[in-house]
Amino acid sequence: MVAPTSFFADYGCHVRILEETRILQKLGHQVTIATYHNGKNVEGIDIRRTLPIPWRRHYEVGSSRHKLVFDALLGLKTLELLARGHYDIIHAHLHEGALIAHLLGKLFGLPVVFDFQGSLTEEMIDHHFLERESFFYQPLRRLERWINRTSSIIFTSSAHAERHLLEQFGCDPAQVRVLPDCVNADVFLPSVDLDPTAQADLRRQLNIPDGHKVIVYLGLLAEYQGTGLLLEALQRILATHPDVYLLLMGFPGVQQYRQQAKALGIDHAITFTGRMSYEDAPRYLALGDVAVAPKLSLTEGLGKLLNYMAVALPTVAFDTPVAREYLGADGHLAVRGDVESLADKILASLYPAATDKWNQEMGKRLRQRVIQLFAWDQAGQMIVNTYRELIERRTGRSNTGPSSHTRLATQRNDQNLGAEINPGSPAL
């Protein structure tokens, strides 16, 4: 795998890379991850890192001109690994990884899978690193188009991303396959399945007042994630419901949003945890009465929703295609970018009417949905079947006989998912 990021960093695409690796290992495959110099090592995962660059030793997240140097070093590391080892597939994450993989894949005669996790140019705009009117926009857009259309197989995390590739970049429908973000529902558990004494102790450690209802957020803290809008919504909520508390978990903009919370007069009702370990996330999320995901991006994934769903939390998100796809009919969807709408939806989740059974049972239905539609065992088999297909294309072989490994036997029939996963070729 080629991962042009500081893997592992307890958020977003890193979780997808990690869980894909774990399920592939579970199915009997060996995975090596080539990534940047920084990042947290994970026990049992083969991670190979680039050399550092002296003037940017602590880079971890976000668009930056320094990524050009990081990506050049990542290309050299990937070249070194391919020259010294034996690999069957290059699985590339993000557009920078796909560019490296396409160039080196041709050199070594290896098939490439591109794990698409959002538009390159749109993400740069979201991060305020690029403007649509910039001289560099069109060249970068053409590069993005070339990477997309050169890829033999593209995995997307949503049907919306699939449509984006087909409509905006002219990709062939045969190229694109929906591989949704998934979640381990045996790890992310509802609060009723956890030790109540330990959870009460954790609540006290976080200074959450007794009797207060808790909103939880887990992810990056940034404007395109809607963090500032969430704080403004909390200010509106506290004006009428002072018994509400926000557990805000994530990084990197902690100091920026502490200052905003203080300016809004709501800092007494928030605990900023900073960076949250992926291993600790389930029990922290289980403290919540409602979860929120006010992400504004229309092209990136929204994997945090699946963690919320697995913990059986009523969930509020801005109304985007990806949020609709994951939550189905059982989410509270606020008008995108509207603070008042976001506050209203959070309140509706926190204080459902006594007669509103739909609201009261929302969390249970969301957990059932995530178990049925977003399990890593199913996704892992789809990945392996795709690998086999690409290897057989390259070698001209075809194996249509029964597999000695488990076939993907489950189809996703839910119309909101927008795609159906069919039984594929035998596993490697």
Image (cartoon, rainbow, N blue to C red):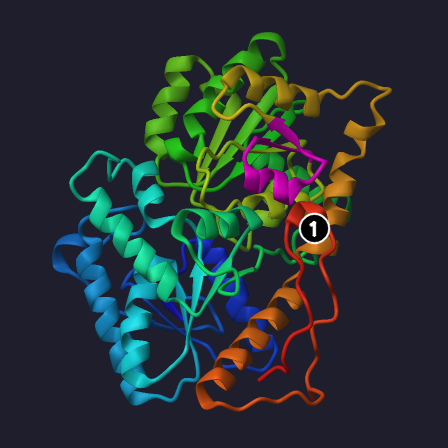
Residue located 49% across and 90% down the image: 396
Residue located 65% across and 58% down the image: 184
Q: Quadrant of residue 71?
A: bottom left
- Residue 65 in the image, given as x and y percentages of width and height: 18, 49
- Residue 167 in the image, given as x and y percentages of width and height: 45, 47
Q: SS class of the residue under badge 1?
A: helix
What residue is shown with label 1? 370
Relative height, residue 101 to residue 143 (above, below): below
* Residue 139 placement, left or right of 117: left
Q: Residue furthest top?
A: 240
* Residue 231 placement, left or right of 334: left
Question: Camera-side residue: 135 or 315?
Answer: 135
- Residue 197 in the image, given as x and y percentages of width and height: 72, 42
Question: Camera-side residue: 216 or 66?
Answer: 66
- Bounds of the magenta span? 314-333
Q: Residue furthest right?
A: 355
Count of marks overlaid on the render:
1
Residue located 20% across and 67% down the image: 73
Image quarter where the C terminus lies is bottom right
Q: Quadrant of residue 214?
A: top right
Is residue 95 at all visible to an observer of this figure? yes
Relative height, residue 389 to residue 399 (above, below): above
Relative height, residue 63 to residue 289 (above, below): below
Question: Camera-side residue: 200 or 384?
Answer: 384
Is residue 5 at all visible to an observer of this figure? no
Report the amino acid beneath label 1. Val
Residue located 70% across and 79% down the image: 406
| The magenta stretch spans residue 302 | no
- Residue 424 in the image, given as x and y percentages of width and height: 64, 75
Image quarter where the N terminus lies is bottom left
